[in-house]
Amino acid sequence: MKKILFVLLLCFINSFSQEKFTISGSIKDSASGETLIGVSIIDKDNYQGTVTNEYGFYSLTLSKGKHNIEISYLGYNTISKPLDLTKNITLNFSLTENAESLSEVVITSSTEKISIKKAEMSVNKMKVKTIKEIPAIMGEVDVLKAITTLPGVTTAGEGQSGFNVRGGAADQNLVLLDEATLFNTSHLFGLFSVINADAIKDLKLYKGGIPAKYGGRISSVLDVHQKDGNKYKFHGNGGIGSISSRLTLEGPIAKNKASFFISGRRSYADLFFPLIMPDNDNTAFFYDLNTKVNWEIDEKNKLFLSGYFGNDVFSLSNSFINNYGNAVGNLRWNHVFNNQLFSNLSLIYSKYFYGLELDFVGFKWDSGLQNINLKYDLKQYFNDNVSVEYGFNTILHQFNPGKIKPNRDDSKIEENQIAKKHAIESGVYVDVSQKLSDHIDLRYGLRVSSFARMGEKDKNIYAGSPVDYDADLKIYEQATPIGKKDYKIDEALKTYINLEPRFSIAYSFNNNSSIKASYQRMAQYLHLISNTQSPSPLDIWTPSGEYIKPQMSDQIAFGYNKDFKNNYSLTVEVFGKTVKNRLDYIDGADLIAQEAIESVVLAGKSRAYGLEFLFKKEIGKLSGWISYTLSRSEQQTKGRTPEEIGINNGAWYATGYDKTHDLSLLLSYKPSKKWNFNSNFSLQTGQPVSYPTGSYEYLGVNVPNYGLRNTFRLPIYHRLDLSAIYKPKKYEKKKFKGEWVFSIYNIYNRQNTSSILFSQDVETGRNITEKLSIFGIIPSVTYNFKF
C-alpha cells in the first residue's frame, strides 16, 4: 500500500514539475487581414486546445518538447505545424479560404471539435455566408429573421419586430453591435432588420449558459461584430434589390497597419411613389450606415473606432410624419500585456430616438433614450486547464419619455416636457473556464450588478400604491398623486444590488459526444412597456425605481451533443425558466404619452419551459438543418391582497409570443460552382390572441366585450420560401464578380393570418370579423457584385 501511495505521489509531483511554455498570437484571413473568431488551435498529440476570442487572439500553454499543432476553421484550409517548444513564443497565422468547399471534407478523429467538450451550451453561431443563402422576403437578407430558424427562437408574428428566445419577451434580449446596445432592431415597423449582413463578421446567440460578462437582460444575448476592413487591398461589394440597394467599401489606410470599412444601405420605394401617383406626397424609406476604422499600433496594441447610424421615415402627405432610429459608437483599445493576459477597454455610446409629427392636430412629439457605457474586460490564460475573464462596466442612462410642442403658429397645443429619468447601472464580474479532466469541463462565474435610479423633477408622490383597486367594480385604476417633488439629479432615489451566479458543466464521453448542464441568474433593470404583441416605436422604455422592481430570471438547461461521421451533428436541449417582477399592464391602460407609467402596471411573474432539437449538416453539396421546439410560455399576475382579482383573475395565461410548436427546415444544394439552390420551410402554432366573448350597446354604438387574455389562437402559420443563386462563369477569373439571386417568398401563397379585426356592419348592424394577412407570394430578384 505504501509503495502504491509513493508512486501516486511521484506522479502527482511530476505532473506539476513539468516545464511548460505558452504559444500565443492572432489568426487572420490571409486575403483581408480580418481577425477570425472561434478558430480552433489544437495539439493533436494530446487533444489540448483553445479557440480565438472575439478579437482573434489565442493563448495555449503546453509542456516543453515536441508538439503537432493544428489550426482549423470551417470554410478555411487547415494548417498543421510541428513545433519544438522550448520557450514562450508568439505565433500568428493567416488562413486561406477553402476553394474546394463543394467537395465533401471528412473530419477525422484527430481534428477535435472543441465545442463538444467545452462547457458552452445553448449557444448558436451563424456564418454570414449561411445567412445570405437563406431565402428572404423581397430578397432582403435579414440577420434577425435568419436566427428565428434556430430552435428556441421565434417572432411574435409575420411583419412584427423583435424576436423571442425561450419564451421571453422581445425586450429581454440584449442585442450588441460591436458591444453597443441596439434598442430597436427593425426597419419599416418590423419588416426588415437594422443589421446589414454585408457589415457583419461574426454572430453568436446565447440562449442560456450566458457568460458572466454579459448583463442587463434576462433572456438572451445576440453578440454581433462588424468587419474591421481589409488591410491589404481596396475592395467593394454591394447589391441592387427589389426594395433596397447597398454598397460596401473597405481598404487599407496604412497597408498592413490600418484600414477602414464603410457600408451603406437605403430602401427606395419612396422614389417610385411620384411615378405611380404623381400627386401623392407619401414617403416610406429607411437607411443605415455602418462604419469602422482600426489601427494596429504594434503587436500588442490595437485601436478601433466603429459606429452605426440608421433611420426610418414614414410620411403621409406631410400631415403625418414618423421617424425613428438608432445611433451607436464605440472607441476601444485592445492590449496584450503578455502571452497570457489580454484586455479590451471600451467607451460606448448608444441612442434610440423616436419622433412623431401630426400636422392636422398641430403638434410634434420627440422621445427616446441614450446611454454612455465604460467597460474594461480582461482575460487571463493561466495554463492549459484554466482561464479567467474578469472586468467591470458602468452605464449612465438617460430616458426622455417625451416632449410635445406645437408645430405651427395656430396650434392650440402647449409645449410640455415629461420629466426625464436618469439612472446608473454598473457591474463587476469574474468568469472561470476550467478543465478538470479529459472528460469534465467547467465554466462558472459571478456577476454583481447594481442599479441606482437618480433624481428627477416633478416626481409623483402617492399616499399608497400608484395603482388603486375598486373592489365594487373589480377593476384597477390609476391612483391620483397627492403631490409632486423635485429631486437633485445626483441623488439616488432607489438602489438595487443583485448577485448573478452562472454555472455550466460538460461531460464528454469521447471526442464526438457529450452531455451538458447550465444554470444562470440574471437581472434586468430596464423595462419595455407595451400592450402590443411585439415592440413598436411608440412603446416606452422605463427604468426600475421605487415602484417598479427589476426583473429577475433563473434558468436551468440540460443538453446532449453528438457529432456523426460525414459532418452531421445533433443537439438536444431541455430548459426551464422563471421570471419575477414581470410587468403587466392593467385593463384599459393608456401607454401613449403616459407620464406615470407606474400607475398603469402591476408586477407579476412568468415561466417558460421546453424541448429543443437541432440536426445539422454544414459541409458538402447538400447542407442545412432541421430545428424543432416544443415549448410553453406563460404569465401570471395575482392580486396584491386577497380581495383583489389580479390580471386575468390571477390565473396563468399564455404570453403573446407563446408558440407550442415551432419547426424550421433549411436545405442548401450546390450542384456546381454556378448554382446554389436554397429552401426554407417554417411551421408554427398560431400566436395567442384575445377575442370578444360578447358585446353591448352604448349610445347607439356596438361595443365588443373581451374575456380573459390570450385564451384563443390564430390559425397555424406555415410557408415555404425558395431561392436560387447564379454565378456566371465569365466572372470567375475577373476582378469584378457578380451573381443573381432569384427568390420566391411564400411560394404556395399561404394567406397566414396576422390578426383578426372585429367590427360592425354599418348597414345590418351585425358584428363581423375580418382576417388580415400581410404577405402572399412575393417574387424578387437581386443582383450582387464585388470588386
Image: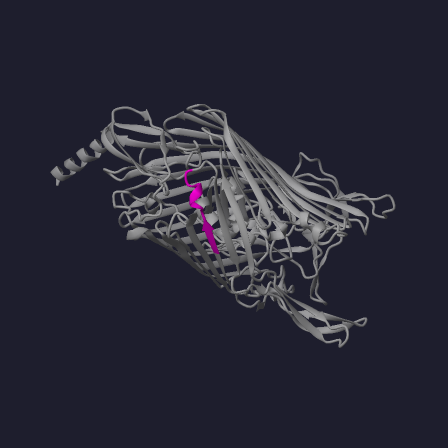
The quarter of the image holding the N terminus is: top left
Please tell me whether residue 490 belongs to the stretch shown in magenta.
Answer: no
At 25% from the left and 43% from the top, the residue drawn is: 110
Is 695 above or below relative to 639? below
At 40% from the left and 55% from the top, the residue drawn is: 625
Residue at the farthest right position: 410
- Horizontal and vertical percent for residue 632? 49, 62
Report the front residue among 587 and 265: 265
Report the front residue among 247 and 546: 247
Is 619 above or below relative to 718? above
Left or right: 514, with 450 as reference point: left
- Horizontal and vertical percent for residue 687? 56, 63
Residue 210 visible in the displayed image: no
- Number of marks in the rendered image: 0
Identify the image quadrant of residue 613.
Answer: bottom left
Left or right: 757, with 363 as reference point: left
Report the front residue among 618 and 270: 270
Please tell me whether residue 731 belongs to the stretch shown in magenta.
Answer: yes
- Horizontal and vertical percent for residue 379? 42, 33
Residue 145 visible in the displayed image: yes
At 62% from the left and 61% from the top, the residue drawn is: 639
Is 194 above or below relative to 231? below
Left or right: 387, with 322 as reference point: left
Coloring applied to the structure: one colour
- Horizontal and vertical percent for residue 403? 75, 43
Q: Report the span colored magenta.
A: 723-733
